[in-house]
Amino acid sequence: MHSLYMYRQYTSATPVDQTTTGFKATIGLELHVQLLAAQKLFSAASAKWNEPPNTNVNVADAGFPGALPQLNPECVQLAARAILALNGQIQQRSAFDRKHYFYADQPLGYQITQQHHPIGRGGYVDLGLLDGLEYVKRIGIHQLQLEQDTAKSIHGVYPGHVLVDLNRAGVALIEIVSKPDVETADEAVFYVRKMQSLLRHIGVSSCNMEEGSLRCDVNVSVYRDGEDRLSGTRCELKNLNSLKVIRGAVNAEISRQIDVVRRGDNVEQETRGYDAQSNTTFVTRTKEAAPDYRYMPEPDVPEIHINDSWIARLHKTLPETPEVVMARMMPQYGLAQEDIETMLGEPGCTAFFEQAVVGRDPKRVLSWITSEVFGQLAYRSQRLADSSITVPQFTQIIDALSSDAITSAQAKQLLIAFMDGEQRTVDELIAAHGWEVISDDGKLRVISKQLLDAHPKEVARYLKGQTRRLNFFVGKLMQATNGQAKPQNASEIMKELLEARR
């Protein structure tokens, strides 16, 4: 079969729980996604929320009287990219609302959101074999709205007190509300994972659940076979922060609601949390205690008006969808699905790869990108698009390594230099550091014999069967040549000379 129809062998469907027979679930998801904007949604403060507390905040974020919000156009563009990539429609008129509630992490006393006139409506995500699902399923999108994030509450530092870090207050989010088309925990997980891949690929968000740039709320209800699928009473599971937690929480809540119905009781509409240790959900807020948000139009932020030409220009900037990239690159370069998914997780990486791979071994290029380049990016907390490394610099390293002009260790040092902003070419750096590879076997033999003569005890141990002592001599040879000998060549010469002494 065509490689497009390959699917994850390591992902299996959740085993059918016989206690759920006769019931089905209706599930809707709300994803809160932090945008990759440099500044906050309504202020010029930096959107880097993970810096020292209360350093990236201004008077608008802190709710000072008289401070007015000013919409960041970069956030509008990122949100519009997301709805286009989700096959939805950008609304040519959208507006903001105030969602009132009072809590320490909300300095304004309300959140500015788009409850009634969102920037995007409609769209869908298709799940199938490439996503780990053994059938095809379309999950509809109800709407996509812009909104500001809250501050971060810190508990337990001082007993009886809650500390507040305003760095995150006002950071731009999009909330993506699905239609209630999901029916199983697996579908929910695959939907979120596909959203992560898509939004990273188009440069909208990093979508790291561990750091909170993607947060998930799930609405779950159950109904008996043959009944209206929207007839059940829904409960909302809040703040699910990993794919594993989403799967566990949804399955646990489905089982709980079925038990309630079978006992003849009514499922109460409420908000619930999930305890992974006991694999149960618990009440955090009942319907009666739910706040009245008193939505009202935001008077200080003008409506957003978008014309057809702006939408058309934005549409042209979107890259191929991950599905198209996957279907094309797997057969073209002989890469595994997981390899391409890894590159898709870093915006701009597939384009970087395809420019670098021309005339070169795809496996070697891939390996260096996903191990060495990604390793440096992680160490520097950088994105590839913000890095100093260019495709010509990267290919110079690969070419020099392939021609044995440098060793792997030297290649890694060159990569670090380029990512530090070095502008000289690989040839110039090799000459400057004296890194030319010693290809003269005669010269290496002379040095190797000197090393063997200098370490007679180690030679004797090798000859008595301690063959691992070969590594000792190879290390000494690499040290003596300042890393200019090829490791494989050094090993072969050393082994030959040691065996000759038997």
Image: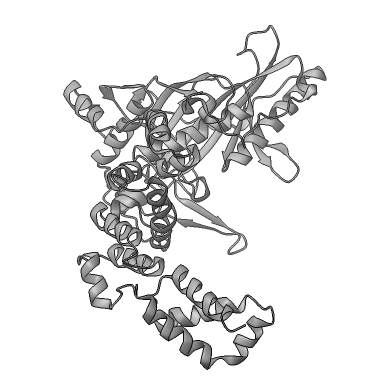
Q: Could you tell me which residue is drawn at 53 percent across and 37 percent down? A: 216
Residue 208, image x, y percentages:
47, 46
Q: Residue furthest right?
A: 263
Residue 240, image x, y percentages:
58, 40
Which quadrant, please, contains the C terminus? bottom right
Q: Residue furthest left?
A: 309
Q: Residue furthest top?
A: 226
Q: Could you tell me which residue is drawn at 25 percent across and 58 percent down? A: 393
Residue sitting nearer the eye, 97 or 432: 432
The colouring scheme, among rainbow, by chain, secondary structure or one colour, is one colour
Residue 320, image x, y percentages:
33, 31
**Residue 237 visible to an observer of this rendering:** yes
Residue sitting nearer the eye, 255 or 10: 10
Q: Is 76 left or right of 248, judged from the image as shown?
A: left
Q: State which quadrant residue 470 falls in.
A: bottom right
Q: Could you tell me which residue is drawn at 31 percent across and 75 percent down? A: 435
Q: Is residue 217 above or below residue 383?
A: above
Residue 153, image x, y percentages:
51, 53
Q: Is residue 189 above or below residue 151?
A: above
Q: Is 402 left or right of 367, judged from the image as shown?
A: left
Residue sitting nearer the eye, 359 or 300: 359
**Residue 482 visible to an observer of this rendering:** no
Q: State which quadrant residue 387 falls in.
A: bottom left
Please tell me how many numbered marks the rendered image carries. 0
